[in-house]
Image: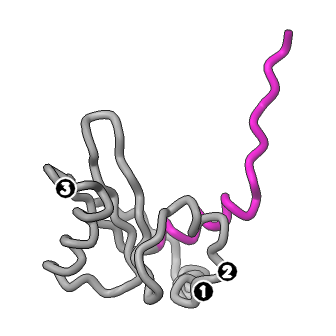
C-alpha cells in the first residue's frame, strides 16, 4: 500500500519563513519547566520582542517559543497565525527589502 505524503500548510510554511528572520536564543531549562526557563531568561537578559527562544528540555526535545509584545506563545501557533502579530509584519517587510544573507547562531 502506498504511503500518503503529509500535506504542508502554505500558511504555516509562510509563518516559518517569517520566523527565520527573528532573533533566536538557545537556552537549557535545567530544573525549571521550559516555559518558566524561557520567561526567566527573557526577564534576566531584558530581551525585546520579537524573539524566538529555543529551550532544550533534554537531549531529544527542544521547545520553541515566540516572545511578542502580547506575551509568550508557542512557535507553532505563531507560524500558523503569523498575521495576528504586528511585529512580524514589520519583520516580513524588512526581510523582503534586504538581500538574503546566511546567519549563524
Question: Residue 36 falls in which quadrant of the image?
Answer: bottom left
Residue at image mark 2: 83
- Residue 44's x, y, as percent? 14, 79
Q: Nearer the viewer, mark 2 or mark 3?
A: 3
Q: Residue at x 41, y 64 (%)?
A: 65
Cα–Cα span, label 1 and label 2: 7 Å
Q: Earlier in the sequence, mark 3 or mark 1?
A: 3
Helix, strand or loop at label 2? It is: helix
- As displayed, is residue 40 above or below residue 86? above
Q: Residue at x 26, y 35 (%)?
A: 59
- As displayed, is residue 86 above or below residue 57? below
In the image, 30: left or right of 18?
A: left
Numbered disc total:
3
Number of the label disc, if any, that sits on residue 67:
none
Cα–Cα span, label 3 and label 1: 32 Å
Residue at image mark 1: 89
Q: Quadrant of the C terminus?
A: bottom left
Q: Which residues are magenta?
A: 1-21
Foreground residue, 36 or 4? 36
Amino acid at each position: 500500500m502506498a504511503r500518503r505524503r503529509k500535506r504542508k500548510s502554505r500558511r504555516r510554511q509562510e509563518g516559518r519563513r517569517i520566523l527565520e528572520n527573528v532573533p533566536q536564543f538557545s537556552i537549557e531549562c535545567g530544573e525549571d519547566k521550559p516555559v518558566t526557563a524561557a520567561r526567566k531568561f527573557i526577564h534576566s537578559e531584558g530581551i525585546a520582542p520579537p524573539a524566538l527562544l529555543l529551550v532544550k528540555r533534554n537531549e531529544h526535545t527542544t521547545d520553541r517559543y515566540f516572545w511578542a509584545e502580547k506575551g509568550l506563545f508557542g512557535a507553532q501557533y505563531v507560524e500558523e497565525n503569523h498575521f495576528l502579530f504586528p511585529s512580524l509584519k514589520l519583520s516580513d517587510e524588512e526581510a523582503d527589502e534586504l538581500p538574503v544573507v546566511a546567519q549563524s547562531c
